[in-house]
Amino acid sequence: MVTIMTNILTLDSMKNLSVDEIVKLYRHGYRVEGLADPVVNFGKVMVSTGYDNLATTIVLNSEEGLKLPNPSSDGPFNLIWYNSTDYPDPSDDPSVEIVRVTGKAADTLTITRAQESTLASNKNTVGKTYKMILAPTKKTITDINVQIDSHIAAISAHGSSGNVVGQTTLDTYFNTSTGHDHDGIDSKTVDHTNLTNKGTNTHAAIDTHISAISAHGAIGNIMGFGNTRFKTGTSSRNMATTGSQSITGVGFRPTGIVIIAVIGGTSAVSIGFSDGTGAYAINNYHYQTANTWQGGTSIIHMTIGVGIYAYANLTSFDADGFTLTWGNDGTSPTGTCNFYYLCLR
């Protein structure tokens, strides 16, 4: 049997284990290591001073560390480090860098430099402010895809009959002659008809549960949900028109939505999201104040000119889509807003 030194099972350590060994370890408190990094909302922090390209201990402004996860309990994570004075958008900073946070003590971070194909660079130009932000990167998406693929493969492996891989029936799998550990009662007989001397679930109840798992099918869909867990689409709106706009054809009642809106040929851009109880958006505020962005609580907010704007509020999630209510500042803004949505089930 492979020796595991901690109570965490990694994918690498599991590859040489049998199903029996994995089940036994799970019963003794072992758990599978998480694949994705920890995340938080609004994880943007200000660095207290400048650092050169060799620094690996970074001090943040007072209490900024509270905005970030704790690597010792939540796991390590990546941050984007950039010059916020000259580049409000980190992707525009030629010296932007991704670092990995491996330790945190109050406002002091221990980091590994030059992550995800970025280069370690000086972050100490006089008069400039440097910030770090916990935001999605290529690693974020890759980790999610790996985790999804792993879960789908695990569910698919159950097969059409619902038996555990490598076993024909639950009686075979729990046969005491094979030496399985029945949660601390090695080599003892367990009544697999009524399980009278261990637990309250009957054998039939367990078979029913495994049959339900089998019904997920080869790609691991949740029963009753089919293949559709999200839906993308596009629509448009004349900025001078107020009132209700219903979007249909989604195929289900959403529980969350992301909308990106633009007016072609202009700098008017809005990115918003909602869970149906609250909505937030950021929009390019350039027409009002050059090179700035603004936040708001409408799911779409378009700044079209100085003192000229239009907006949309999410009114409801509907059985086949969602409804927006449009308004503006009363000056009859012009242009057509094209918006692109991602509905989540």
Image (tube, helix red, strand yellow):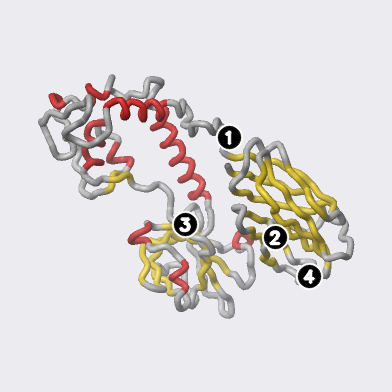
Of the two numbered discs 1 and 4 on the same chain, state the one appearing first in sequence: 1
Q: Is residue 46 above or below residue 4?
A: below
Per the image, the residue denoted by label 4 is 288
- The 10 Å Cα crowd at callout 2, few under 14, some 14 to 19, many 20 or more, is many
Confirm or deny contact between disc 1 and disc 3 (CB under 8 A). Answer: no
Of the two numbered discs 3 and 4 on the same chain, state the one appearing first in sequence: 3
Q: Nearer the viewer, mark 1 or mark 3?
A: 1
**Relative to 320, 266 lies left or right:** right
Q: Residue 228 got which mark?
A: 1
Q: Nearer the viewer, mark 1 or mark 4?
A: 1
Q: Nearer the viewer, mark 4 or mark 2?
A: 2
Q: Between 214 and 196, which is closer to the camera in this rendering?
A: 196
Give coordinates of residue 163: x percent, y percent: 33, 23
Q: Between 308 and 315, which is closer to the camera in this rendering?
A: 315
Per the image, the residue denoted by label 3 is 39
Give coordinates of residue 267: x percent, y percent: 77, 59
**In the figure, residue 105 lies in which quadrant?**
bottom left
Q: Residue at x 46, y 26 (%)?
A: 218
Q: Residue at x 24, y 49 (%)?
A: 7
Of the two numbered discs 2 and 1 on the same chain, state the one appearing first in sequence: 1
Confirm or deny contact between disc 3 and disc 2 (CB under 8 A). Answer: no
Measured in 3D between alpha carbons, the distance from the residue under mark 4 to the one under mark 2, in whole angstroms, is 18 Å
**Relative to 73, 122 lies left or right:** right
The kind of residue tagged 1 is: Thr
Per the image, the residue denoted by label 2 is 298
- Whether residue 164 is visible, yes or no, is no
Of the two numbered discs 1 and 3 on the same chain, state the one appearing first in sequence: 3
Q: Is residue 327 above or below residue 52?
A: above
Q: Between 168 and 13, which is closer to the camera in this rendering?
A: 168
- The 10 Å Cα crowd at callout 4, few under 14, some 14 to 19, many 20 or more, is some
